[in-house]
């Protein structure tokens, strides 16, 4: 069970790091509205420009905490809670601007993984 918990942490962490550090300026079919970049997504959601930096900092920091959490388990619970809350926010934003459901799928998958990891709390 411990290995499954670590795999979930790594899938969440590496997925977030990929989106925020490797592909922030690449178009994907999951970006909000007609955006082709992360910054464009936040503009499509009607959010102020500074929010992209705040959310990015939270997501990258939480992703790194999940990786370090392999050796320092006390970091895992707060990290998955932060990511889970942000994923709920992402899903809400997609619906708010009328995106098709498929654009919310990555956030929904991440949210489910966060919930699973929380349910495995005894494995921290």
Image: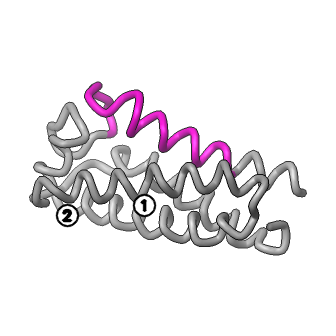
Q: Nearer the viewer, residue 96 or 80?
A: 80
Q: Nearer the viewer, residue 36 or 95?
A: 36
Residue 43, x across and y down, in percent: 11, 50
The residue that appears at 48% across and 68% down in the rendered structure is 82
Residue position marked by numbered label 2 in the rendering: 96
The residue that appears at 62% across and 67% down in the rendered structure is 115
Residue 113, x across and y down, in percent: 62, 57
**Distance between mark 1 and mark 2 Cα atoms:** 14 Å
Q: Is residue 121 above or below residue 51?
A: below
Is residue 23 covered in magenta?
yes
Please report whichever mark, 1 or 2, sits nearer to the chain's N-terminal start. 1
Residue 103, x across and y down, in percent: 34, 45
The residue that appears at 75% across and 64% down in the rendered structure is 73
Secondary-structure class at tag 2:
helix
Residue 33 left/right relative to 120 = left
Between marks 1 and 2 in the image, the one whose residue lies nearer the viewer: 1
Q: Is residue 81 above or below residue 68?
A: below
The image quadrant that residue 10 belongs to is top right
Residue 50: assigned label: none
Residue 2 left/right relative to 88 = right
> Number of callouts in the render?
2
Residue position marked by numbered label 1 in the rendering: 87
Q: Residues within 10 Å of mark 1 (few under 14, many from 20)?
A: many
The residue that appears at 38% across and 39% down in the rendered structure is 20
Residues drawn in magenta? 9-30
């Amino acid at each position: 069970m411990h290995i499954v918990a670590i795999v979930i942490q790594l899938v969440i962490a590496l997925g977030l790091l990929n989106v925020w550090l490797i592909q922030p300026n690449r178009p994907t079919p999951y970006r909000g509205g007609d955006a082709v970049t992360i910054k464009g997504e936040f503009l499509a959601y009607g959010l102020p420009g500074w929010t992209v930096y705040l959310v990015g900092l939270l997501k990258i920091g939480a992703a790194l905490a999940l990786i370090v959490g392999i050796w320092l388990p006390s970091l895992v619970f707060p990290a998955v809670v932060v990511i889970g809350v942000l994923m709920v926010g992402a899903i809400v934003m997609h619906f708010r601007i009328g995106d098709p459901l498929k654009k919310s799928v990555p956030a929904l998958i991440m949210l489910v993984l966060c919930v699973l990891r929380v349910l495995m709390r005894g494995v921290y």
